[in-house]
Image (cartoon, rainbow, N blue to C red):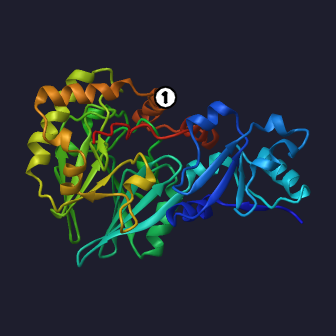
Amino acid sequence: MAVKAMTAKEITEKALKKENLFILDVRNEADFNDWKIEGENFEYLNVPYFELIDGVDPIKEKLPKNKEILVVCAKEGSSKMVADMLDEAGISASYLEGGMKSWSEHLEKIKVYEDQDVTVYQFVRVGKGCLSYMIVSDGEALIVDPSRFVEEYEAFAKEVGAEIKHIVDSHLHADHISGGRMLADKLGADYYLMKSEGATFDFLPLEDHEKITFKNVMLEVLAVKTPGHTPGSVSFFVNNKLLFSGDTIFVSGLGRPDLGNKVKEWAKDLYKTVYSKVSQIADDVIVLPGHYGNLDEEMNEFGYIGATLGDIRKRNEKMFNATEEQFLEQVEKSASSVKPPNFEEIVAINRRGKFVDPEKMQELEIGPNRCAVHHAG
């Protein structure tokens, strides 16, 4: 009997439901330590595939007898072969369909907010820690920070009976290739970005559109020079209730200030952002960030990634109640952490708006998110 494939979506559902899963990861040790499938109740055994070429006998005693086993590799082939060997040895196991590449690309859709004016959906790219959003009002939709999988947004808009007419990017992303221009070109939608980001293609500058209104939505652009990856990051304040914070505020911290090699200057800008603009926003406003660091820690009791600004202030009390000197010292410490893989090339692609072939984009994006690294609790 052929072994079964498990999809990235099925694994995501297990992670969200906090189910048990034993993962046998047959990639090399460095790749496993750098980036793996994460779940609160997931257990792991990392044994490189080349150590199992002669059979699985060396690891049989290390495998659980009463837990579901999933074999994982980079592209699928090695994990399928190991799963077959386990099956021949009388051990039931599945393999990850499409390997870690499919894990990197899966988008999980979650409804995060609804009132009489708007419905908001969060697209969780679980394998990357990236978040994008669809704001729907009376049959019209706005997309925030879309990934390059434009067909997913298009199909979901049809599913909820909406037409995508507006697209915004909070900055030029460093860890993934934006789908903003691709989606706008395909659908004829308006695409907005800060002019100060230096993009070389046509778009609507957010400097000239401090408010975007449609149907029952009023989106305010909090245009400040904030750290993260760029000099022109922005946040979007919708109907005075929802703050789409891009890479400025995360549930567990603040944006990193070092990708532009101007740590001190951008850390000062971040201080001004936190203590002037953000300090004026009410505690009950819901913050919806552009990234997260740990799914188990940052997903709330309602099943999405986000929190009220009041909760974030409490969670990161040291950062929200610091002197400027203390703040700068704390933020600069985060600059020593590992930068996102291939970030310079990804930013360059996003700046030009000219996209390489899908396989190259997939290769550039592979690996973990390292944008939400500044946990300041």
Indicate the amino acid at tag 1: Glu
Tell whether 16 sits left or right of 351.
right
Q: Residues within 10 Å of mark 1 (few under 14, many from 20)?
A: some
Tell whether 36 sits left or right of 277.
right
Q: Is residue 258 visible?
A: no
Say which of 190 and 361 sits in front: 361
Q: Where is residue 294 drawn, in percent x and y?
A: 43, 48
Number of numbered markers: 1
Residue at (40%, 34%) from the top-left corner?
351
Q: Image quadrant of residue 4?
A: bottom right
In the displayed structure, 82 sits above or below 328; it is: below
Q: Is residue 203 visible?
A: yes
Q: Where is residue 287 drawn, in percent x and y?
A: 26, 56
Mark 1 sits on what residue? 345
Tell whether 10 sits left or right of 192.
right
Q: Image quadrant of residue 57?
A: top right
Residue at (66%, 55%) from the top-left corner?
22
Q: Where is residue 195 drawn, in percent x and y?
A: 26, 37
Residue at (71%, 55%) from the top-left corner?
70
Say which of 339 and 142 sits in front: 339
Residue at (34%, 33%) from the top-left corner?
229
Q: In what element is the residue under mark 1?
A: helix
Quadrant for the C terminus, please: top left
Q: Where is residue 8 drawn, in percent x and y?
A: 62, 58
Quadrant for the N terminus, please: bottom right
